[in-house]
Amino acid sequence: MKNKYEWQSTACQPQLSVKGNENVYCVEFVRGDIITLEGIPATLPFGGSGGGRGWSPSAWTPQHGTPIGADVIYYAGYEEKFYWTC
């Protein structure tokens, strides 16, 4: 395969301030594996989301392959719960 689809993984959330606490809907990734059609490993970054919905101030290492699914564990501080998506 000569040309591989390249994309940036980013994370964002609705921006909300409650009692002076900014971005209360921020999520923290524990594990973030992206499943690609070509079988090329792709990942989400460790750390939290940033910015407002639909916008992120940062991007991570370019990823390759066609995303078809995700195996992600994240912590939602607002709800004090862990979630797993597959």
Image: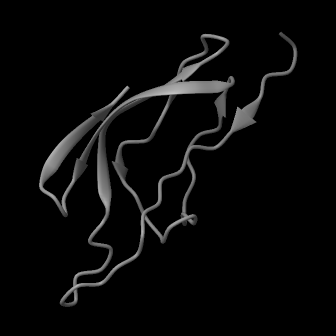
Q: Position of residue 68 (x, y in %)?
A: 59, 24
The image's colouring method is one colour
Q: Which residue, as the protein is rendered here, is positioned at the far bottom? A: 19
Could you tell me which quadrant the C terminus lies in? Answer: top left
Q: Is residue 41 left or right of residue 5?
A: left
In the rendered view, would you say 84 is above or below 25? above
Name the residue located 67 percent from the left edge and 12 percent from the top edge: 38
Where, by quadrant of the figure, is residue 82 drawn? top left
Name the residue located 57 percent from the left edge and 52 percent from the top edge: 59
Name the residue located 54 percent from the left edge and 18 percent from the top edge: 41
Q: Is residue 20 left or right of residue 7?
A: left
Q: Position of residue 13 (x, y in %)?
A: 42, 63
In the rendered view, would you say 32 is above or below 52? above
Q: Position of residue 15 (x, y in %)?
A: 40, 75
In the rendered view, would you say 4 is above or below 77? above
Q: How many marks?
A: 0
Q: Is residue 86 left or right of residue 53?
A: left
Q: Is residue 47 left or right of residue 4?
A: left
Could you tell me which quadrant the N terminus lies in? Answer: top right
